[in-house]
C-alpha cells in the first residue's frame, strides 16, 4: 500500500518521532547529541520554525515543531540528511541510520500542545536515562531543562510555553513542573502516538464506547485531534492539492 502524503501548512503543529533503523542507536555519545542539537538549532532558526519541546533518547528522538513558511519536509530533510552523513563519517559506518522516514503527526494545538510538551519531556525519565525529577530538571538533552532555566538553548521557544502557565517566569516554571509531575503516573500515552482513531477519540476506551454506540468519527493516522479537526485538516489539504494541480495545468 502506498504511503500517505504528509500533511503540512504554515503554522501547523507537528509531533515528530525519529527512530533508528532496527531500533539501533542514533546517538552513541554526547558528541553525537551535541551535533544533532547544533544542527537542529541552526536549521529551525534559519527557517523560522518554532521548537516547543524535544528529547533525545539513544535510539530515537521526539521534537514538537510549529512550521513557518518553510515546509516541514525541507526542515527535516536538511536535519536528518546532514546528521546521518556526519554520524556515518564519524563512526566509520555506511548505510541507513534512520528507520524508514520519520513519523510526523499534525496536532490540534488548543487541545494537545501542553499534553505533548509534557509527554515528550517525560521521555528521558520513562527510559530511565534520568532517575529522579531533580535529575530530569538538569538533563541537557531535553527541552525540559531549558524550560526550567537550567540549560540555555536559544532555538527553543520557552516564552510561548511558559506564558501558558503564568505571567511571571518563576511562577510559570513552578506551575509547569507541577504539571509535568502529574503526568508521571499516566505512564505511556498510546492516545498521543497510536492509530488515528485512537488519537481522535481520546484512547481505546473511547473507541470501544463509540463502536458500542455505532458512532463514527473522522480520523487519520497523520492527525492528532478530534473528528472535526481531522476533517478540517483533510479538507484544507485537499484544497491545496487541487490548487497546485490547477496551477500546473
Image: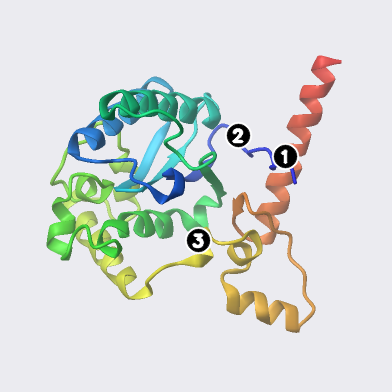
**Measured from the top left, where is residue 72 in percent x and y?**
52, 31
Q: Point out the frontmost of discs 2 and 3.
A: 3
Q: Distance between the residues labelled 3 and 1?
A: 23 Å
- Residue at point 37% right, 43% down? 52
12 left or right of 125 in image: right
Q: Position of residue 197 (x, y in %)?
A: 66, 64
Structural crowding at the residue carrying mark 3, measured as other residues with C-alpha within 10 Å and reported as few (<14), some (14–19) or many (≥20): many
Q: Are the residues at dot 2 and dot 1 in contact (C-beta closer than 8 Å)?
A: yes
Q: Are marks 2 and 3 in contact (CB under 8 Å)?
A: no
104 and 237: which one is in front?
A: 104
Residue 9 got which mark? 2
Residue at screen point 38% across, 73% down: 186
* In the image, residue 246 above or below residue 210: above
Q: Element at badge 3? A: helix
- x and y, in percent, of residue 165 in the image: 31, 56
Q: Residues within 10 Å of mark 1 (few under 14, many from 20)?
A: some
Provide residue 45's location: percent of width, then percent of height.
35, 24
Dot placed on the residue nearer the N-terminal end, 2 or 3 = 2
Q: How far apart are marks 2 and 3 (CA)?
A: 21 Å
Residue that badge 1 annotates: 236
Q: Is mark 1 on a helix, strand or loop?
A: helix
Residue 192: numbered disc? 3
Left/right placement of residue 16 relative to residue 2 reads: left
Q: Nearer the viewer, mark 3 or mark 1?
A: 3
Residue at far front of view: 93
Quote the CA–CA distance across marks 2 and 1: 9 Å
Q: In this view, does 116 lie to the left or right of 92?
A: right
Q: Which of 243 and 161 is in front in this view?
A: 243
Q: In which quarter of the image is residue 172?
A: bottom left
Q: Quadrant of the C terminus?
A: top right
Instruction: Tell me, yes or no, whether the two marked residues, 3 and 1, touch with CB atoms within 8 Å.
Output: no
Amino acid at each position: 500500500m502506498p504511503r500517505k502524503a504528509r500533511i503540512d501548512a504554515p503554522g501547523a503543529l507537528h509531533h515528530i518521532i525519529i527512530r533508528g533503523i532496527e531500533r539501533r542507536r542514533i546517538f552513541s555519545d554526547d558528541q553525537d547529541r551535541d551535533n544533532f542539537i547544533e544542527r537542529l538549532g541552526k536549521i529551525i532558526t534559519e527557517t523560522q520554525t518554532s521548537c516547543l519541546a524535544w528529547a533525545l533518547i539513544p535510539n530515537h528522538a521526539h521534537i514538537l515543531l510549529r512550521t513557518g513558511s518553510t515546509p516541514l519536509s525541507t526542515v527535516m530533510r536538511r536535519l536528518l540528511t546532514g546528521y546521518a552523513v556526519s554520524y556515518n563519517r564519524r563512526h566509520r559506518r555506511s548505510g541507513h541510520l534512520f528507520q524508514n522516514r520519520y513519523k510526523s503527526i499534525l496536532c490540534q494545538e488548543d487541545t494537545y500542545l501542553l499534553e505533548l510538551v509534557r509527554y515528550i519531556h517525560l521521555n528521558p525519565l520513562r527510559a530511565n536515562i534520568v532517575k529522579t525529577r531533580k535529575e530530569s530538571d538538569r538533563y541537557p538533552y531535553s527541552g525540559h531543562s531549558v524550560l526550567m532555566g537550567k540549560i540555555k538553548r536559544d532555538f527553543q521557544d520557552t516564552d510561548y510555553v511558559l506564558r501558558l502557565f503564568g505571567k511571571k517566569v518563576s511562577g510559570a516554571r513552578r506551575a509547569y513542573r507541577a504539571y509535568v509531575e502529574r503526568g508521571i503516573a499516566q505512564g505511556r500515552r498510546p492516545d498521543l502516538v497510536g492509530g488515528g482513531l485512537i488519537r481522535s477519540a481520546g484512547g481505546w476506551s473511547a473507541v470501544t464506547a463509540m463502536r458500542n454506540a455505532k458512532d463514527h468519527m473522522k480520523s487519520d493516522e497523520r492527525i492528532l485531534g478530534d473528528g472535526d479537526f481531522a476533517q478540517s485538516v483533510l479538507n484544507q489539504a485537499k484544497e491545496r492539492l487541487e490548487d497546485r494541480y490547477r496551477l500546473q495545468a
